[in-house]
Amino acid sequence: AQTVTQSQPEMSVQEAETVTLSCTYDTSESNYYLFWYKQPPSRQMILVIRQEAYKQQNATENRFSVNFQKAAKSFSLKISDSQLGDTAMYFCAFKIYGGSQGNLIFGKGTKLSVKP
Amino acid sequence: DSGVTQTPKHLITATGQRVTLRCSPRSGDLSVYWYQQSLDQGLQFLIQYYNGEERAKGNILERFSAQQFPDLHSELNLSSLELGDSALYFCASSAQGALLDTEAFFGQGTRLTVV
Protein backbone atom coordinates (compact mmCIF):
# COMPACT_ATOMS: atom_id res chain seq x y z
CA ALA A 1 0.00 0.00 0.00
CA GLN A 2 1.11 3.52 -0.70
CA THR A 3 1.43 6.15 2.01
CA VAL A 4 2.19 9.87 1.90
CA THR A 5 3.57 11.74 4.89
CA GLN A 6 3.73 15.46 5.45
CA SER A 7 5.61 16.09 8.66
CA GLN A 8 4.91 19.83 8.96
CA PRO A 9 1.31 20.49 10.08
CA GLU A 10 1.82 24.25 9.95
CA MET A 11 4.33 26.69 8.55
CA SER A 12 4.58 30.41 8.13
CA VAL A 13 6.67 32.64 5.90
CA GLN A 14 7.09 36.34 5.33
CA GLU A 15 5.83 37.80 2.11
CA ALA A 16 8.47 37.72 -0.67
CA GLU A 17 10.52 35.04 1.09
CA THR A 18 11.03 31.40 0.14
CA VAL A 19 9.51 28.42 1.91
CA THR A 20 9.89 24.67 1.44
CA LEU A 21 7.20 22.15 2.31
CA SER A 22 8.24 18.55 2.89
CA CYS A 23 6.67 15.33 1.71
CA THR A 24 7.81 11.74 1.86
CA TYR A 25 6.07 8.72 0.44
CA ASP A 26 6.30 4.99 0.51
CA THR A 27 5.63 2.71 -2.41
CA SER A 28 6.95 -0.40 -4.10
CA GLU A 29 5.85 0.90 -7.50
CA SER A 30 8.44 2.22 -9.91
CA ASN A 31 6.17 4.33 -12.09
CA TYR A 32 3.94 6.93 -10.51
CA TYR A 33 3.00 10.58 -10.36
CA LEU A 34 3.42 12.99 -7.51
CA PHE A 35 1.40 16.15 -7.06
CA TRP A 36 1.09 19.18 -4.87
CA TYR A 37 -2.44 20.52 -4.45
CA LYS A 38 -3.37 23.80 -2.86
CA GLN A 39 -6.59 24.30 -0.91
CA PRO A 40 -7.27 27.97 -0.11
CA PRO A 41 -10.04 29.06 2.28
CA SER A 42 -12.45 28.77 -0.64
CA ARG A 43 -11.76 24.99 -0.20
CA GLN A 44 -11.30 24.41 -3.93
CA MET A 45 -8.56 21.85 -4.62
CA ILE A 46 -6.13 23.38 -7.09
CA LEU A 47 -3.28 21.52 -8.76
CA VAL A 48 -0.03 23.38 -8.17
CA ILE A 49 2.55 21.13 -9.76
CA ARG A 50 3.02 17.57 -11.05
CA GLN A 51 6.05 15.32 -11.29
CA GLU A 52 6.35 12.09 -13.25
CA ALA A 53 8.57 9.61 -11.41
CA TYR A 54 10.37 8.54 -14.60
CA LYS A 55 11.56 12.10 -15.21
CA GLN A 56 14.79 13.04 -13.50
CA GLN A 57 14.31 16.75 -14.06
CA ASN A 58 12.47 18.54 -11.29
CA ALA A 59 9.18 20.14 -12.31
CA THR A 60 8.81 23.92 -12.19
CA GLU A 61 5.73 26.13 -12.53
CA ASN A 62 6.53 29.81 -12.21
CA ARG A 63 7.29 30.43 -8.51
CA PHE A 64 6.71 26.79 -7.59
CA SER A 65 9.32 24.08 -7.96
CA VAL A 66 9.90 20.64 -6.54
CA ASN A 67 12.89 18.71 -5.31
CA PHE A 68 12.18 15.12 -6.28
CA GLN A 69 14.52 12.54 -4.75
CA LYS A 70 13.29 9.17 -6.00
CA ALA A 71 15.72 7.01 -4.06
CA ALA A 72 14.90 8.82 -0.84
CA LYS A 73 11.17 8.89 -1.72
CA SER A 74 11.08 12.58 -1.02
CA PHE A 75 9.09 15.26 -2.86
CA SER A 76 9.37 18.76 -1.43
CA LEU A 77 7.71 21.92 -2.73
CA LYS A 78 9.56 25.22 -2.84
CA ILE A 79 7.58 28.43 -3.11
CA SER A 80 9.68 31.43 -4.08
CA ASP A 81 8.70 35.07 -3.62
CA SER A 82 5.76 34.05 -1.40
CA GLN A 83 2.57 36.03 -1.87
CA LEU A 84 -0.40 36.56 0.43
CA GLY A 85 -2.50 34.53 -1.97
CA ASP A 86 -0.30 31.51 -1.32
CA THR A 87 -1.89 31.19 2.12
CA ALA A 88 -3.61 27.80 1.99
CA MET A 89 -3.44 24.14 2.93
CA TYR A 90 -0.99 22.26 0.74
CA PHE A 91 -1.43 18.57 0.08
CA CYS A 92 1.11 16.19 -1.35
CA ALA A 93 -0.46 13.36 -3.34
CA PHE A 94 0.56 10.15 -5.09
CA LYS A 95 -0.94 8.29 -8.02
CA ILE A 96 0.13 5.03 -9.61
CA TYR A 97 0.95 5.29 -13.29
CA GLY A 98 -0.64 2.83 -15.62
CA GLY A 99 -2.82 0.94 -13.18
CA SER A 100 -6.54 0.44 -13.57
CA GLN A 101 -7.23 2.81 -10.70
CA GLY A 102 -6.65 6.50 -10.95
CA ASN A 103 -7.27 7.63 -7.41
CA LEU A 104 -4.96 9.93 -5.50
CA ILE A 105 -3.46 9.16 -2.11
CA PHE A 106 -3.02 12.29 -0.04
CA GLY A 107 -0.88 13.36 2.85
CA LYS A 108 -2.55 15.11 5.77
CA GLY A 109 -1.52 18.53 4.57
CA THR A 110 0.56 21.51 5.64
CA LYS A 111 -1.14 24.76 6.56
CA LEU A 112 0.91 27.61 5.12
CA SER A 113 0.43 31.17 6.29
CA VAL A 114 2.09 34.01 4.39
CA LYS A 115 2.52 37.07 6.59
CA PRO A 116 2.74 40.64 5.30
CA ASP B 1 -13.60 26.96 -12.40
CA SER B 2 -12.63 23.30 -12.74
CA GLY B 3 -15.74 22.35 -14.71
CA VAL B 4 -16.82 19.85 -12.04
CA THR B 5 -20.11 20.78 -10.38
CA GLN B 6 -21.22 19.52 -7.00
CA THR B 7 -24.57 20.10 -5.36
CA PRO B 8 -25.53 21.05 -2.79
CA LYS B 9 -22.68 23.18 -1.44
CA HIS B 10 -23.88 22.82 2.14
CA LEU B 11 -26.08 20.26 3.82
CA ILE B 12 -27.19 20.03 7.43
CA THR B 13 -29.04 16.94 8.55
CA ALA B 14 -29.81 14.92 11.65
CA THR B 15 -28.27 11.66 12.80
CA GLY B 16 -29.90 8.60 11.29
CA GLN B 17 -30.96 10.40 8.15
CA ARG B 18 -30.01 9.72 4.51
CA VAL B 19 -28.63 12.24 2.04
CA THR B 20 -27.60 12.26 -1.60
CA LEU B 21 -24.70 14.27 -2.95
CA ARG B 22 -24.53 14.97 -6.65
CA CYS B 23 -21.62 15.47 -9.01
CA SER B 24 -21.48 16.49 -12.66
CA PRO B 25 -18.04 15.80 -14.14
CA ARG B 26 -16.23 17.93 -16.68
CA SER B 27 -17.61 17.58 -20.17
CA GLY B 28 -16.12 14.46 -21.74
CA ASP B 29 -14.65 13.02 -18.57
CA LEU B 30 -15.58 9.38 -18.06
CA SER B 31 -14.25 8.82 -14.58
CA VAL B 32 -15.58 10.15 -11.29
CA TYR B 33 -13.94 9.89 -7.89
CA TRP B 34 -15.37 10.62 -4.47
CA TYR B 35 -13.21 11.75 -1.56
CA GLN B 36 -14.01 12.55 2.04
CA GLN B 37 -12.10 15.29 3.85
CA SER B 38 -12.39 15.32 7.61
CA LEU B 39 -10.25 17.06 10.21
CA ASP B 40 -8.82 13.89 11.72
CA GLN B 41 -8.52 11.66 8.64
CA GLY B 42 -7.50 14.15 5.99
CA LEU B 43 -8.49 13.42 2.39
CA GLN B 44 -9.61 9.83 1.95
CA PHE B 45 -10.52 8.16 -1.31
CA LEU B 46 -13.96 6.59 -1.18
CA ILE B 47 -14.85 5.18 -4.59
CA GLN B 48 -14.22 5.52 -8.33
CA TYR B 49 -16.59 5.01 -11.24
CA TYR B 50 -15.59 4.77 -14.86
CA ASN B 51 -18.20 5.05 -17.59
CA GLY B 52 -20.95 3.80 -15.33
CA GLU B 53 -19.08 0.97 -13.67
CA GLU B 54 -17.39 0.80 -10.31
CA ARG B 55 -13.63 0.64 -10.80
CA ALA B 56 -12.07 1.02 -7.38
CA LYS B 57 -13.10 1.18 -3.76
CA GLY B 58 -11.27 2.90 -0.98
CA ASN B 59 -12.28 3.53 2.60
CA ILE B 60 -15.99 3.63 1.94
CA LEU B 61 -18.35 2.56 4.69
CA GLU B 62 -21.10 0.04 3.99
CA ARG B 63 -23.62 2.77 4.85
CA PHE B 64 -22.36 4.71 1.86
CA SER B 65 -23.00 3.88 -1.78
CA ALA B 66 -22.50 5.55 -5.10
CA GLN B 67 -23.48 5.21 -8.70
CA GLN B 68 -22.72 6.78 -12.04
CA PHE B 69 -25.54 7.31 -14.49
CA PRO B 70 -25.58 7.04 -18.30
CA ASP B 71 -25.13 10.81 -18.59
CA LEU B 72 -22.00 10.32 -16.44
CA HIS B 73 -23.16 12.31 -13.45
CA SER B 74 -22.65 10.57 -10.16
CA GLU B 75 -24.41 10.43 -6.83
CA LEU B 76 -23.03 9.52 -3.43
CA ASN B 77 -25.64 8.22 -1.00
CA LEU B 78 -24.94 8.40 2.71
CA SER B 79 -27.37 6.65 5.04
CA SER B 80 -27.84 6.12 8.79
CA LEU B 81 -25.74 9.22 9.26
CA GLU B 82 -23.59 9.62 12.33
CA LEU B 83 -21.93 12.69 13.80
CA GLY B 84 -18.59 11.40 12.55
CA ASP B 85 -19.79 11.55 8.96
CA SER B 86 -19.62 15.33 9.11
CA ALA B 87 -17.00 16.26 6.52
CA LEU B 88 -16.31 17.89 3.21
CA TYR B 89 -17.09 15.53 0.33
CA PHE B 90 -15.27 16.11 -2.92
CA CYS B 91 -15.98 14.82 -6.34
CA ALA B 92 -13.23 14.77 -8.96
CA SER B 93 -13.25 13.76 -12.58
CA SER B 94 -10.69 12.71 -15.15
CA ALA B 95 -10.82 11.75 -18.78
CA GLN B 96 -9.81 8.11 -18.75
CA GLY B 97 -9.57 7.05 -15.16
CA ALA B 98 -6.03 5.82 -14.95
CA LEU B 99 -3.63 4.97 -17.69
CA LEU B 100 -3.64 8.13 -19.74
CA ASP B 101 -4.62 10.52 -17.01
CA THR B 102 -2.17 12.69 -15.21
CA GLU B 103 -4.65 14.96 -13.52
CA ALA B 104 -8.01 14.93 -11.80
CA PHE B 105 -10.18 18.03 -11.56
CA PHE B 106 -11.99 18.70 -8.31
CA GLY B 107 -15.37 20.20 -7.61
CA GLN B 108 -15.86 22.71 -4.81
CA GLY B 109 -17.13 20.08 -2.43
CA THR B 110 -20.25 19.54 -0.36
CA ARG B 111 -19.99 20.44 3.30
CA LEU B 112 -22.06 17.92 5.25
CA THR B 113 -22.90 18.64 8.85
CA VAL B 114 -24.66 15.96 10.87
CA VAL B 115 -26.29 17.23 14.06
Image: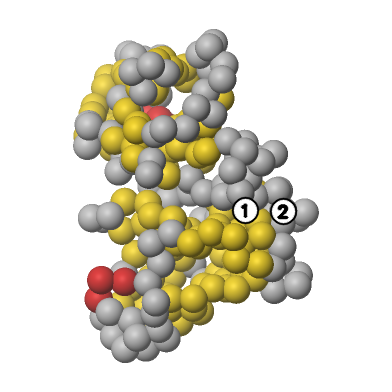
- The 10 Å Cα crowd at callout 2, few under 14, some 14 to 19, many 20 or more, is many
Locate residue B48 relative to residue B78 in the image: left or right: right
- Type of the residue with mark 1: Ser
Q: Is residue A25 visible?
A: yes
Q: From the image, tell me which residue sits under label 1.
A: B93
Corner quadrant of residue A89: top left
Q: The C terminus of chain B lies in which quarter of the figure? A: bottom left
Residue at the image point whose x is 69% and y is 68% from the top:
B52
> What chain letter is assigned to the residue under label 1?
B
Q: Nearer the viewer, residue B63 or A45?
A: B63
Percent of width and height locating residue A21: 32, 24
B22 versus A102 height, above or below: below
Corner quadrant of residue B32: bottom right
> What chain letter is assigned to the residue under label 2?
B
- The answer to which of marks 1 and 2 sits earlier in the sequence is 2
Residue at the image point whose x is 66% and y is 67% from the top:
B53
Marks 1/2 in contact by CB < 8 Å: the verdict is yes
Q: From the image, tell me which residue sits under label 2.
A: B29
B33 versus A110 height, above or below: below
Locate residue B17 relative to residue B56 in the image: left or right: left
Percent of width and height locating residue A3: 34, 40
Q: Nearer the viewer, residue A54 or A77?
A: A54
Extreme residue toward the top, this view: A57
